[in-house]
Amino acid sequence: MGPSSGYHPAVEEYLETILELEESGIPPMRARIVERLGVSAPAVSETVKRLEREGYLVLDERRCLRLTDTGRRYATSIMRRHRLAERLLVDVLHVPWSEVHEEAGRLEHAISPRLETYLVRLLGDPGTCPHGNPIPGSANFHDDGPLVPLAAVTAGKAAVVRRIDERLESQYERMRALESGGLLPGCQFTVTAVEADAMQLRVDGEDVRVPIPVAVNVYVTAA
Ligand SMILES: [Zn+2]
């Protein structure tokens, strides 16, 4: 079994979600999949059992889902196709930055290894998705050094946006607010104030308010 053996959206969604949870530093437990995919707990248990039977993952002694080598290879290929699809949508089709995550979630399952080769060539083997997340296997990924959540930056400090965590990408109101505030990867800003429920930033001469639940999912480096 593998990415070229057919069309398995449920399997692909689960494996991709586990990899995204790891990327967010969240222990991949079944309850987290319930939250992220919006499916019932019994349905998740059922599919996890199937994935275990098929050799994609194991449940460790702490009830965390651990990808096997096969599972990790498969999950990585889906994450790669998702992020390439996002680049295609933004760079070529000019779909708004805040909206491409969902469309890419549909496209990713339809991209064959052969089509992927053409995509990589057209897009110039990009290092990251439009939200700054690394595209696995790209020769052009450039490491910006250790990233910190925006929420950890103190007032008076300047920083640069590097990546928007996948878990924020499906929250469209929040993504639109980031887009209209200009807080895209590469954008430099200064923190002017930190309040109980939000941060005040100065971006390109404009004041932008970022709620804390957003600020914990935006990763930055010092400017
Ligand atoms: Zn995405």
Image (cartoon, grey):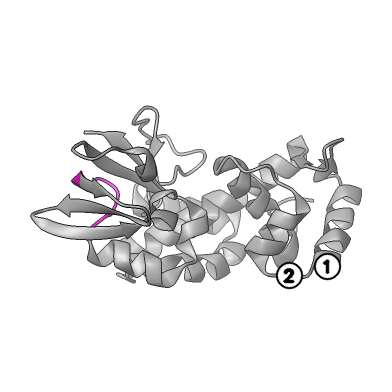
Q: What secondary structure do most residues of the magenta stretch adopt?
A: loop
Q: CA distance from mark 1 to mark 2?
A: 7 Å
Q: Residue furthest left?
A: 205
Residue type at numbered disc 2: Val
Label 1 crowd (10 A; few <14 / some 14-19 / many >=20): few
Report the residue marked by disc 2: 39
Q: Position of residue 178 (x, y in %)?
A: 31, 61
Q: Residue at position x 69%, y 41% from top?
A: 72
The answer to whether residue 14 is magenta is no
Determine if residue 218 is in view: yes
Give the left or right position of residue 151, taking residue 192 as reference.
right
Q: Which residue is identified by label 1?
A: 43
- Give residue 12's position: percent from left, percent from top: 69, 58
Which amino acid type corresponds to the residue marked 1 in the rendered image?
Ala
Q: Are marks 1 and 2 in contact (CB under 8 Å)?
A: yes
Pointer 2 local density, CA inside 10 Å: few below 14, some 14–19, many at least 20: few
Magenta residues (range): 182-191
Q: Position of residue 118 (x, y in %)?
A: 45, 55
Looking at the image, how many numbered discs can be counted on the residues?
2
Report helix, strand or loop for mark 1. helix
